Amino acid sequence: MSYCLNPNCPQPKNLPDARFCETCGRALLLGDRYRSLQLLGQGGFGRTFLARDEAYDPEIHGTLAQCVIKQFSPTLSSQSDRRHAADLFHQEADQLWQLGKLPQIPELYDYLEIDGEQYLIQEFIDGPTLADELKSEGPFDELQVRQVLNSLLPVLQALHDRQIIHRDIKPTNILRRKELPSKAQNLPGSGELVLVDFGASKYVTPELLSRTGTTIGSAAYAAPEQVMGKAVFASDIYSLGVTCIHLLTGMHPFDLYSASEDTWIWQDYRIHPVSDRLTDVLNKMLQRATRDRFRRADAVLQALHRSVGPVVRVSRPVPTLQGNEAAIEVAAPPLELAPPDTARIPQTWDCVFTLIGHAGPVEAIAISPDGQILASGSTDNSIKLWELGGGRLLHTFPGRSLRFPSGHNARIRALAFSSDGRILISGSDDCTLKWWDMETRTFLQQTPEHGWSIAAIAISQNGRLVASGGGDGLVDLWEIGSGAPIARLQKHRDAIGSLLLSPDGKTLISASDDSTIRLWDLESDRIIRTLRGHNARVSAVGISTNWLSLISASTDETIRFWDLSNGRVIDTFLAHRAGVTCLALAANNRLLATGGEDNRIKLWNLTQDEAGRLRRTGERPLSLPSAWSVKAIAFSPDSRVLVSGSDDETIRIWQAI
């Protein structure tokens, strides 16, 4: 069907391929390109249509040509008012154009102004709203609400950092994007959350924050100051809090507030148990006075994960790929690290902690051999140590300053623990390796600056050898105790991105921006084999425990499996829709995690063939969302905890359920 965009057309429905409306004669292709198919909704700001881009080339852009048309028909009499409305429309379109580049916000494809009517052409998000899920599945439990908060708070912080207040956050404006068809991705509660409908959003300046303006938004979810026309950033936090208690109770917000007591009474209508920690966070989000409310979205995340509340168990099962039913822990309990030999292939993962503290993208991650400590390195030049099981910040090695002259003075590119966990070694764009004592949390020693950044580190399991790779394409070998240089390997023509050392320290694997992977015999310092196949830089490599299979990731968007006995490719596949930046192989060799510039983490089930080589099982990967590009990824020793570092300056800890 073709739907006429004339607001006054008495019969807007037309044949699918019609060029002009049979009733009013209006052209049915907006801008000679966009065909309206169905009216999705209408309100005070205009109408929204499902549409198709007739100029879409599936060979270039893929298979989907659907989009959304938002039509605005301002009824303004004076020419000055029309000019003002046009100026505002173009300003808002420019704002949406920039916002659409952020993850979890629909992309703006085009904007048009025709015959006094204004149109936005936006990405179509295929999926239910949270209101739809509430209606079909019933009230949310704590785990589901935590997932909503973990997903949307980074989006709000990104908006607020750009001085934008959404002003209309509610369940109908939060969609869950459907992923590619798979059994896991069709489960309730899976899929990335997307914040839509920026028609009420506002770009603010310090002057505007103190000025009374227009009351915009949905009254049931709007903060008191917003109702009076004085929305601030904390107004969005209030609206998200109201959204959460609506999802927890299934009741309209007006029914959850006692006017006689002037307080929220949502706790009296909970369907599932809610921990004290989440209750406290929600109550602070819902404070009527802005001075008592969270003022920043990242502060909400910090409070949500600052400490661990009591374990709350619910009887509502969470399905897995196998359809197993099991109770879940929803209050972010301390992670239990099981011995590696008991690990199974987990099929459902939950983000139990989002760690905030770095002031720049997190580009390096390492987990201690005992699985207790997480180390992170950032472009803010600092290294932070965290308690992996509780998400608590233990220590910070800050960037170089007068107070801390031993710190790095450029971004951290690589981190590695010694096999006994007593030493952490860091590599930086300041061209040095630094040794840190994990018992005393002090600086030990560093290598001399050699003029090139260090982006890769590997330490042998026998605790004797350290390898580092630099931007000059050289691999340097160091004695781990003294930091003395041992040898230098030079064959790569571009920067080293990843290194692996065999347990005995006799074999080294190096991956480079020159798109090659090289195997070295360290007893003779000679190349054993060079692997070629990627057509862009090799960003990461992983190795099976039996050292028979090598896995490589590249910015050419592919993953390759190699047979190390002969150097042949076993498997090549397109893993992400943008460059693959990092990978991690679980210690049990049954799970591969990859991270990409497409803001995705993917988990691939693996198996071994008769020769002991790793292969994919053929199942679709499980996809985990990231707010921004994923830069680093690592598994805990027991293979049940996954840690990711991202461009959004956060670290996410994922636990297998």
Image (spheres, helix red, strand yellow):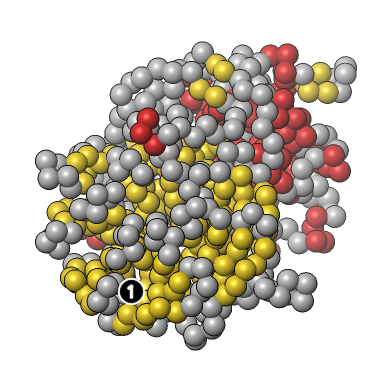
Q: Position of residue 456 (x, y in %)?
A: 43, 68
- Secondary structure under the numbered disc 1 in the rendered image: loop
* Residue found at x 27% / y 73%: 523
Q: Position of residue 428 (x, y in %)?
A: 53, 72
Counting the numbered discs, the total is 1
Q: Position of residue 250 (x, y in %)?
A: 60, 18
Residue identifier under label 1 = 513
Q: Nearer the viewer, residue 162 or 487?
A: 487
Asked whether, in this view, residue 517 is left or right of residue 457, the answer is: left
Q: Nearer the viewer, residue 92 or 58?
A: 58
Q: Is residue 122 visible?
A: no
Q: Is residue 475 visible?
A: yes
The relative height of residue 129 versus residue 627 in the rendered view (above or below) is above
The relative height of residue 519 versus residue 275 in the rendered view (above or below) is below
* Residue found at x 64% / y 29%: 244
**Amino acid found under the numbered disc labelled 1:** Asp
Q: Quadrant of residue 516?
A: bottom left
Q: Quadrant of the C terminus?
A: top left
Asked whether, in this view, residue 641 is left or right of residue 517, the answer is: right
Q: Quadrant of residue 15?
A: top left
